[in-house]
Amino acid sequence: MFEWDDLRYFLAAARAGSFSGGAQRTGVDTATVSRRVARLETALKATLFMRSAAGLQLTSAGARLMEAGLKAEAAMQSVTGAADPEVSGGTVRISAAEGFGAHVLARALPSFRLSRPTLRIELATTAGLLSPTRREVDLAVTLSAPTDSRLLVEPLTDYQLAVYASPAYLAREGPFESAADLRRGQIVGYIDDLLHTPELRYLDDVAPALETALSSSSILAQREIIRAGGGAGVLPCFLSEGLERIAPEVLLKRRFWVSTLRDVAATARVRAVRAWLQDIAAARAHDLNPFASAD
C-alpha cells in the first residue's frame, strides 16, 4: 500500500510537467519529489511517467492515478474548506487569451496576491491556449465555450473590438471614415493559417476581401505594429490606449469564458480564483465595453 503523502508529490509533478516544477509547488527539493514518485511507482507496481525532452508525460496508469488523485484531493480540500471557508492555499495555473491575460489579469495579480498570500498563481498567456482537460492548467479563459462534459464552463465577460490606427498613420494616409475606406490603406491582423480559434477571424466582419499587409500571431505584436504607424487593425478596445478609432460603424463583440475540470472546481483555491476573475471582469467593465450603449 502506498503512502498518501506520496500522492501529493505525484500530483504536483504531473501538474508542473517536471520534478523541478513539482518541487517548487510543494516547497521541497527536486530529489525529494523524484524519490517520492519512485516510491509510489514501486508500491503500485506501475510506471507513472515517461520522461521526454518536453518533460514528464503521464502513462495510462499515471493518467488513471491522477484522475483518482484529483478526486481525493478535492474531497480533502472540501473537508478543510468546510472547517475554514477562508482556506485557499496552493498553486493555481491559469491560461488566458494573450491580450486579456497580459493587459488585464497581469495588472490585477499583485493586489490579488496580497489578499490571498497563501495562493501561488501561474499565468500562461499563449496564442494556442493550454487545456484543463489535459491537466495543463487549472482554469482557462478562452474565446469559445468548451463542450467537454468534464468541464464546468461559465461566461466571464463580453468585450468589444473596433478598428484603430495611430495618429502618425492617419496624418500620413488621411482619414478612414468607413469600413470601405480601409481598402486603400494597410491592414494589420492575424496570420490566417495560425489562427487557433474562429473567433479571431475579424476581417470578414469588417469589410469583404480585406487582406493584411502586416500580420502576426500575437495581438500584442499587432498593437505595436499599429502604434508604430504600420497600418490600421482590429483591436480589443481595452488595448487601444494611444490610438484613434476609425471606421466607426465597425464595432465587434466577443466573449470570454472560464472553464475548469469539475473535479477541481470545488477546491477552495480554484473557487477563490474564479471569484477573482468575475470581480476583475466587473471592475473593468467600462474598459472592456466602452461603447456599450452603441452595442
Image: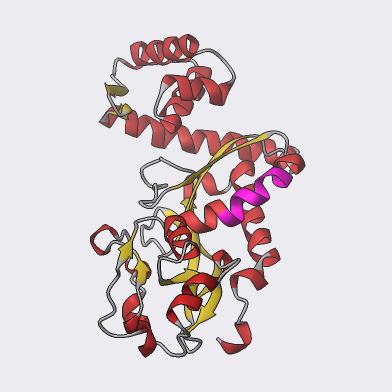
Q: Residue at x 59, y 70 (%)?
A: 288
In the rendered image, residue 18, in percent from the top left (x then y), is placed at 40, 24
Q: Is residue 134 visible?
A: yes
In the rendered image, residue 84, in percent from the top left (x then y), is placed at 75, 39
Q: Is residue 163 visible?
A: no
Q: Is residue 127 above or below residue 167?
A: above
Work out whether residue 264 or residue 192 is closer to the camera in this orientation and state it.
192
Secondary structure mostly seen in the magenta stretch: helix
Q: Residue at x 34, y 17 (%)?
A: 44
Q: Is residue 186 above or below residue 138?
A: below
**Stretch in magenta:** 103-112
Q: Residue at x 49, y 73 (%)?
A: 165
Left or right placement of residue 200 versus residue 6 in this view: left
Work out whether residue 17 or residue 223 is closer to the camera in this orientation and state it.
223
Q: Please, which residue is most extreme toward the front here? A: 172
Left or right placement of residue 249 versus residue 157 in this view: left
Q: Is residue 186 above or below residue 12?
A: below
Q: Residue at x 39, y 47 (%)?
A: 130
Left or right placement of residue 84 versus residue 142 in this view: right
Q: Is residue 236 magenta?
A: no
Q: Quadrant of the N terminus?
A: top left
Q: Is residue 178 above or below residue 201?
A: below
In the rendered image, residue 26, in percent from the top left (x then y), is placed at 56, 22
Left or right placement of residue 107 versus residue 40 in this view: right
Which of the 4 image quarters holds residue 215? Answer: bottom left
